Image (cartoon, rainbow, N blue to C red):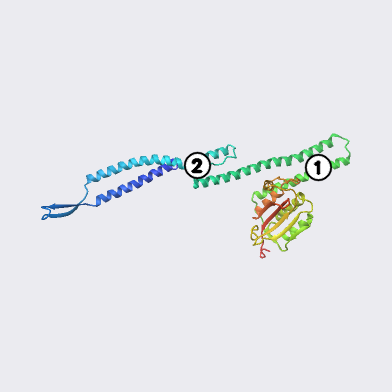
Amino acid sequence: MKRLGLRARITVLFVLTVLGVGLALIGLVYLYLKLTPVPFQAVLGGEDSGAVIDAAVPITEEILRVVLTISLSVLGVLTVLAGLTGWFVAGIVIRPLRDIAASAREVTAGKLSTRVRYDGPRDEAAELADALNVMLDSLAAQVAAQRRFAANASHELKTPIATIQTMADVALEDPDTPVDELRRTLTRVREVNAGQADTVTSLLALADLDAGRTLELHPVNLSELADAIANVHGIERTDIEPGLYATGEGELVRQAVDNLARNAVRHGTPGTAELKAYRASESSPDDAPGTVIVEISNDGPHLTAEDIDQLTEPFARSRTGGGHGLGLALVSAIADALEGELTIVPGRVGGVVVKLELPAATVQDR
């Protein structure tokens, strides 16, 4: 049975159902005729003065044999018709699966824009088609993101290497290059190399989080951390609620808030960065209960929904440029690892509003 195709299995089940029901019905009729005598009435003499005899006699074996033969013959014909009907009906039933398989083959061949086409009723097949289309949309988005990552990473890693190569070639062209100029060239090489080191470090941290490493969670004083980071980056517009504790790993939380603050200052209009830290409000539908929130906003260029969606991709850059483009990608990975959430929405007059929600630590955890 397992070696048969789906259409054949449906047909066999249909035939077995008809055959089983037919045999059960024939058996019941046969037993009823065999066990139930046939009543008859005999009148002896005249109708007025004669004797009336009521009796019952069993059906003869010959009649039972004829009834059984005819019933089985009819059942055989019905079974053949059931097989033909079942094969036809099974073909109609599995037709959506054939369409799904054809679409899957097209996707496998590289046509990621292919979607399952189903025009039937809203039944289980429609639910399957919808689920597969959602999966294909997600797959196409992931592949597109990977392609952008590969292109951006190639550019990010190639450009500094080319810069270092050019500076080295220029310095080596003239054997009489002054020492001061060589020192300036080496200083610039060191700066470019340091930037590359930061990029590689961020990539390693991102890969480490994606690999699901075990975290050592403990209460982190978010109020003190946010205040210290705001001072480091010169963010004067702050509103930090005291006594906020998040459950997390201290270095990861620091890195996440630091990256958000750095991006707000670097990519926004100077002096517009604002940092808030507060406990989630039960009355706010946008805040998850039991969380503490760091919200950082700035003014700046207007960003589209597509721009915002790509900000958390590795090597994505805002329109103002700068940085290695891994900051928000790393923050997003940290939020996921700490069972928090990162949300980014456009600001009212440009720029963005970024919210990092983390699980709150209770007083007992302290």
Report the residue at 14% width, 55% height from top.
52
Q: Residues within 10 Å of mark 2 (few under 14, many from 20)?
A: some
141 relative position to 8: left or right: right
**Mark 1, secondary structure of its residue:** helix
x%, y% of residue 232?
A: 79, 55
First in sequence: mark 2 or mark 1?
A: 2
10 relative position to 206: left or right: left
Q: Quadrant location of residue 166?
A: top right
Work out whether residue 250 can be spotted. Answer: no
x%, y% of residue 1?
A: 43, 42
Looking at the figure, which quarter contains the C terminus? bottom right
**In the image as oriented, which residue stretches furthest toward the front?**
48
Give the CA separation, mark 2 to mark 1: 60 Å
**Mark 2, secondary structure of its residue:** helix
Name the amino acid type tagged 1.
Answer: Val
The residue singled out by tag 1 in the image is 189
Q: Are marks 2 and 1 in contact (CB under 8 Å)?
A: no
Q: Is residue 222 above or below residue 63?
A: below
The residue singled out by tag 2 in the image is 97
Q: Is residue 227 above or below residue 324?
A: below
x%, y% of residue 58?
A: 21, 50
Q: Nearer the viewer, mark 2 or mark 1?
A: 2
x%, y% of residue 185?
A: 84, 41
The residue lying toward the viewer, choosing from 149 and 204, is: 149
Q: Residues within 10 Å of mark 1 (few under 14, many from 20)?
A: some
Work out whether residue 12 can be spotted. Answer: yes
Q: Which mark is residue 24?
A: none
**In the image as oriented, which residue stretches furthest toward the bottom?**
364
Name the amino acid type tagged 2.
Answer: Leu
